[in-house]
Amino acid sequence: MTFINYAAREINCKIVYYGPGLGGKTTNIKYVYEKTNPNSKGKLISLATETDRTLFFDFLPLDLGEIRGFRTRFHLYTVPGQVFYDASRKLILKGVDGIVFVADSQAARMEANLESLRNLDLNLKEQGYDLRAIPYVLQLNKRDLPSALPVEEMKRQLIRKGEPVFDAVASKGTGVFETLKTIAKMVLLELRKGR
Amino acid sequence: MPGTDLVLHEEEFTKIRDVISRLRAECNAKVVFLVDKNGQQIAAIGELSAIDTTALASLAAGNVAATDSLARLIGEKEFSVLFHEGERDNLHISVVGGRVILVVIFDERSSLGLVRLRVKKGSTELAAILDVMLKKSASPRKAAAGGSPFAEITDEDIDKLFSD
């Protein structure tokens, strides 16, 4: 649900990073924060536990500049990936405009990827969204690990609708901005359609 | 309501600003702030220079969302008011019209009783303005003065955002 403010001439969009626990959602957002010009970003807020696990959400506001005289702002959120934080995940999906699914490439985490994807589908449905209709990008993270599954195998299991797929090593920044740019573009194109 | 964007026009914005300005004066508050339930800031007035308003909006919405869920867990419809008491400043958070969040920050120059009283009155006025805003948001974009500026966004416009 994009917020269009004609008075302040701003467009505000919400992008949510979803995926299994320890998959690299927060790492994605932190990298974006570190590499973004100070004038274009707000404070990075992390509601995390003492051991740095996301408890509620991470939040990063980004200012992408002007489009047709409107300041374009993106609010990036991550959800807590751990299974038992489902109530929090549902809350964060409210009003979402675009979703990045951060999958963990390690073979041992494939089941967790699939479970998280099912959970995303279910939580979206509960709020009246459809995964097939909403702007959606799949990121295959941790490609540098020796235990990473082949890309083709991951795609076979995780692709839902022909969405764009990016290989990533979020800790080094590989694929992070490509993913963000693509989802942001998809959200803006959706805005053009006017729904 | 997924799919319905929230659109704020100049006319409603001015009305909202008038109401929250008056509310701020009446309760002697430092800041009065209006946030959409999804965390988007709608309007703010007062001593804002020391406050990160974007973060405040997001956290207030998160706070209300979590509290709403807590309420439902114990069989309540909602907790309509949240109050956080600090050493110097206090935070009064309430939900207006089921859709937006009104945040009042005040210190010892005001009191909880005064804030509660004034917020109640201000909320009724705000709810009426928001009603109009939501109805306009739900109607086709072309209802906006001058038509929708987004229908004509080109791929080039979007690429330009990411040029650096």
Image (tube, rainbow, N blue to C red):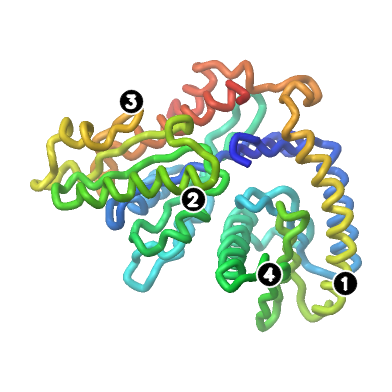
Tag 1: amino acid? Leu
Are both tags, 1 and 2, on one chain?
A: no
Quadrant that contains the N terminus of chain A = top right
Tag 4: amino acid? Phe
Would you identify the image quadrant in which residue A85 lies? bottom left
Mark 1–mark 2 distance (CA, rounded to whole Å): 35 Å
Question: Label 2 is found on which chain of the structure?
Answer: A
Q: Nearer the viewer, residue B23 or B108?
A: B23
Quadrant that contains the C terminus of chain A = top right
On the image, the x and y values in percent for residue B16 come to: 83, 49
Question: Label 3 is found on which chain of the structure?
Answer: A
Q: Nearer the viewer, mark 1 or mark 3?
A: 3
Query: Tag 3, which secondary structure?
Result: loop
The correct choice, above or below, for B54 with respect to A166 in the image is: below
The residue that mark 1 highlights is B117
Query: Tag 1, which secondary structure?
Result: helix
Look at the numbered discs 1 and 3 and tell me whether their residues touch, using CB distance below 8 Å: no
Residue A162: image tag: 3
User: Does residue B104 appear left or right of residue A86 in this picture?
Assistant: right
The residue depicted at 91 percent of the width and 67 percent of the height is B26
Tag 2: amino acid? Leu
Q: Nearer the viewer, mark 4 or mark 1?
A: 4
The residue depicted at 62 percent of the width and 63 percent of the height is B64
On the image, the x and y values in percent for residue A154 come to: 20, 37
The residue that mark 2 highlights is A60
Looking at marks 3 and 2 on the same chain, the residue that comes earlier in the sequence is marked by 2
The residue that mark 4 highlights is B79
Look at the numbered discs 4 and 1 and tell me whether their residues touch, using CB distance below 8 Å: no
Residue A17: image tag: none
The correct choice, above or below, for A151 with respect to A114 in the image is: above
